[in-house]
Amino acid sequence: MNVLDIIKPENQVFCKTKLMTDTALSYCPGCGHGTAHNLAMEVIDEMGISEDTIGVAPVGCSVLAYDFMNIDITQAAHGRAPAVATAIARTWPEKYVFTYQGDGDLAAIGTAETIHACNRGENIVIIFVNNGIYGMTGGQMAPTTLEGMVSSTSPYGREIKSMGSPLKMTELVANLPGVYYVTRQSVHTHKHARKAKKAIQKAFENTRLKKGLSFVEIVSNCNSGWKMTPNDANIWMEEHMFPYFPLGDIKVDGKLK
Amino acid sequence: MSELKLMKGNEALAEAAIRAGADAYFGYPITPQSEVIEYLMTEQPEKRTGMVVLQAESEIAAINMVYGAASTGKKVMTSSSSPGISLKLEGISYLAGAELPAVIVNVVRGGPGLGTIQPSQADYFQSVKGGGHGDYKLYVLAPASVQEMSDFVEDAFDIAFKYRAPVLILSDGLIGQMMEKVQLKDQKTRLTNEELIEKYGNWAVTGRKNRERNIITSLDLQSEKMEARVHRLMKKYEQMEKEDLRYEKILCDDADYLIVAYGSSARISQKAIELARKKGIKAGLLRPITLFPYPKQPLFELADQVKGILSVELNAGQMIEDVKLSVEHKVPVEHFGRTGGIIHTPEEVLEALEQKIINNERTRHHKTRESSIL
Ligand SMILES: Cc1ncc(C[n+]2csc(CCOP(=O)(O)OP(=O)(O)O)c2C)c(N)n1
């Protein structure tokens, strides 16, 4: 059969996500941010809620999320997205409000805002992309940087004694009564991406049902920050990140697993 | 039903926010302004008008909540006192950069550091010289009575939405804590979401319905675009200077000596010029009501008439710099003010006027020079 017989509109099984703009992504090749953006936009599109969704972008590599996501977005100060989202959700209770944040944003400078938005059980979705490093500013140590991991501010590897242990923010917030759904996913293979999409969908469904806060961590890579090829970064992530940040649901329908 | 009530400044401000049709208030307790959130929590405006009130985990969270609600076109306010305002400054800079309307209230206490819970005007520089990072200014209203604590809330919202810019009400512990009678305004109805979208849908993030997406950000990585943004802000500030300057002149027509003072210092100075007049000294008071824009021109003109100017402030000398800039060395300008939470008395102010201005070598020299022209 000729390939041209196959490439026909009626045979199309996958196309560009409708809610992604045509702007070229600013992310490094192989970075998980692009896939995570795609999945969030696919969910919002498929749920038919794009006109009622307000996103909150962080400071970090995804600061320009508003260039790529074709929905209304406000860009928050570093770490403050959960506070920004709180106010939007409180003053527009019928809207779908989500934050999209990196680990430095959510688990270092924004720790207080994260914990308290979770504790109040704000009716929002938090998408937390954990790449174990500060990507935007050039690869400094993050709260989630693994023990022994080299970064530009832990050039001899993270030393627990002086720098503390990598922070499991997701497990921490799962213990708060206001939090309804907590899961940890990844997006580096099709299989994982499909699971992550289901998780994001469940999170937005929870908003629809006014269940409170849904927290979706996506363990991701940072090949430029980790100084690896994209493929090596994914292998390293599976071998080192996943054992410390195990994938799977942590809290479902308000109950710890 | 406009009502006459006896209220604390902080309470009058809180009540005025409800009546102005505010959509939300976010705050964090700090003396001497905690009555604002206490009053709101007790009043339950959610039941009265649907206004949202939330105690945030910090001043940082509160100002970013303000940023969130303001992003969606809601009428939103926060209040704090000096250390809390220092924490809010990054957020205030973001509000200015992202061109969002919001009202921020500072019931000032003495500093630096934890300082004192007593009244002060030591946040003048922080309020009018930027405070946070970057090229921006705040429109700053300085109430001098409980009545103005109430009236300025609606004025502040009007300016905030006129310019899509943050507005600061710069009060102090004295005005916030004292009780006076106050004429409350009638209740304004809050905008419905449909009305809000109609009015602000061209910029606010309310959900991308029947239009292109809206984006709220203060970021421009392209230098030319960022410079254009800064220029846009500067244009707003120029327009504020032209259209929305506010000040009050008291007994200035025949004044030989001038006191410049705002807020509680203006109240005290008004008494001081009355005492001066009883002694036969022709003293007048210029009270800036807006600290930015500053009444530069009125001061410049008064400098041709008076022999000397005393800047009276509850601080170690901050606004005096703007007085000096305004009068361009035409007359001697001196500062008087107590710090540490001590409030100067009218008698002290009069004494300072006599010692620092009337009996000042430069003032006298100035006088002779003037009379030699005559
Ligand atoms: C108040 C403040 N402090 C520091 C910075 C600098 N900064 C920008 S992004 C960033 C770290 C972002 O890392 P992360 O949240 O992990 O996101 P990533 O870039 O890795 O996706 C820092 C420290 C800032 N913009 N604002």
Image (cartoon, rainbow, N blue to C red):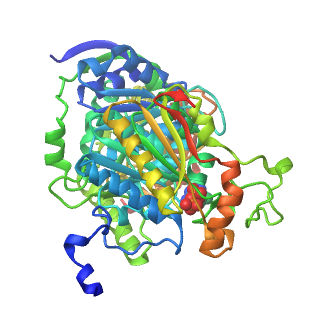
Using the image, determine if residue B281 lies above or below residue A129: above
Q: What residue occupies the far front of the structure in this picture?
A: A1
Residue nearest the observer in this picture, B339 or A91 = A91
Residue at the location (42% across, 72% down)? Answer: A25
Q: Point out residue A206 in the picture as x, y percentages from the top left corner.
A: 37, 35
Look at the image and tell me whether residue A117 can be seen. no
- Quadrant position of ligand 1: bottom right
A55 displayed left or right of B124 = left
Using the image, determine if residue A41 lies above or below residue A201: below
B232 displayed left or right of B60 = left
Q: Quadrant of the C terminus of chain B?
A: bottom left
B373 displayed left or right of B347 = left
Count the labels in the image.
0
Q: Point out residue B201 in the picture as x, y percentages from the top left corner.
A: 19, 51
Q: What residue occupies the far right of the structure in this picture?
A: A161
Using the image, determine if residue A47 lies above or below residue A174: below
Residue at the location (39% across, 61% down)? Answer: A38
Residue at the location (17% across, 35% down)? Answer: B192
| Residue A186, image quadrant | bottom right
Residue at the location (20% across, 74% down)? Answer: A9
Residue nearest the observer in this picture, B292 or B155 = B155
Q: Quadrant of the N terminus of chain B?
A: top left
Look at the image and tell me whether residue B186 can be seen. yes
Q: Point out residue B312 in the picture as x, y percentages from the top left corner.
A: 50, 39
Residue nearest the observer in this picture, B72 or B15 = B72
Residue nearest the observer in this picture, B337 or A158 = A158
Q: Point out residue B179 in the picture as x, y percentages from the top left corner.
A: 40, 15
| Residue B118, image quadrant | top right
